[in-house]
Image (spheres, rainbow, N blue to C red):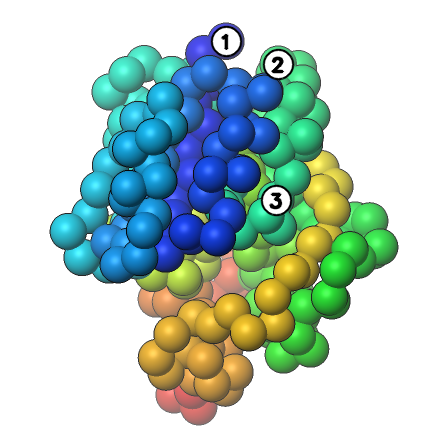
Amino acid sequence: MRTLIAIPVYNERKHVTRVLERVREYASDILVIDDGSTDDTPMLLAKQPVEVIRHAENRGYGHSLLDAFRWARVDDYDWVITMDCDEQHEPAAIPRFLAAAARGEADVISGSRYLDIACEGECPPEDRRAINAEITGEINDRLGLSLTDAFCGFKAYRVQALSGLRLNVQGYAFPMQFWVQAVAHGLTIREIPVKLIYNDLNRTFGGPLDDPKVRLGHYREELHAELRRSADRLPVGALADVATCCQLG
């Protein structure tokens, strides 16, 4: 089972060396997608024995994931594990994702920070937890899922299962499109617990998304747009009140 570890980064000078050194304890095939960093991240990456995709400018979290999926497909990997580079995802959890993948029971193994409630470091800002809970609940209701954490970026994907998806969302709303298409294409989804670690209350999304109301509206808009696009392959009731919700914002 060939597995690629893919790590999107953007201005992670503070964390990138330490994270990669720890990841290398558990994996040898590592791809970093540098999404247009303007700090010392590119120079630090040059000192690491990892593959790097470098964006000339910031293109968004979703774009970085799409690059990782393409790389995994072209290089004939069986699985790709994605994780963040801000020390909120523990490299020590990689073997648990590998073990779950090896069991062959799922196409997507999604980390959940809320299967185990204990929080290490600072707890997430209340607006982030509230938006996660609200959107996760709507995704479950519309798609017949039982997710506890729709936004965790620590995931393992079966590469072959991704081949039928048509993903193009560039930014932080990428999970909205992904969950809808995963259900539309019959992918099997499992959650496993990962630690809830929050180290920096000052981290931001950047721009308008720093406003919780704008962020929630953006996520819902992308979710409803994908529900409409995939309507013919979704459970009955998935589009209930979508037009009204979208008009209300």
* Numbered mark located on residue 1 in the image: 1
In the image, what residue occupies the spot 45% across and 11% down?
Answer: 2
* Numbered mark located on residue 102 in the image: 2
| Label 2: how many Cα within 10 Å (few below 14, some 14–19, many 20+) | few
Apparent side of residue 150 relative to residue 193 in the rendered image (left or right): left
In the image, what residue occupies the spot 15% across and 51% down?
Answer: 56
Query: Disc 2 marks which amino acid?
Result: Ala
Can the viewer see residue 62? Answer: no
Judging from the image, what secondary structure is the residue with disc 2 in?
helix
Tell me which label, 1 or 2, sits earlier in the chain: 1
Nearer to us of marks 1 and 3 is 3
Query: Disc 3 marks which amino acid?
Result: His
Apparent side of residue 1 relative to residue 37 in the rendered image (left or right): right
Tell me which label, 1 or 3, sits earlier in the chain: 1
* Numbered mark located on residue 134 in the image: none
Mark 2 and mark 3 in contact (Cβ < 8 Å)?
no
Mark 2 and mark 1 in contact (Cβ < 8 Å)?
yes
**Residue named by callout 3:** 89
Tell me which label, 3 or 2, sits earlier in the chain: 3
In depth, the one of 60 and 219 nearer the eye is 60
Q: Give the alpha-carbon distance from disc 3 to disc 2, as whole Å.
A: 21 Å
Judging from the image, what secondary structure is the residue with disc 3 in?
loop
Q: Give the alpha-carbon distance from disc 1 to disc 2, as whole Å.
A: 8 Å
Can the viewer see residue 54? Answer: yes
In depth, the one of 124 and 108 nearer the eye is 124
Query: Disc 1 marks which amino acid?
Result: Met
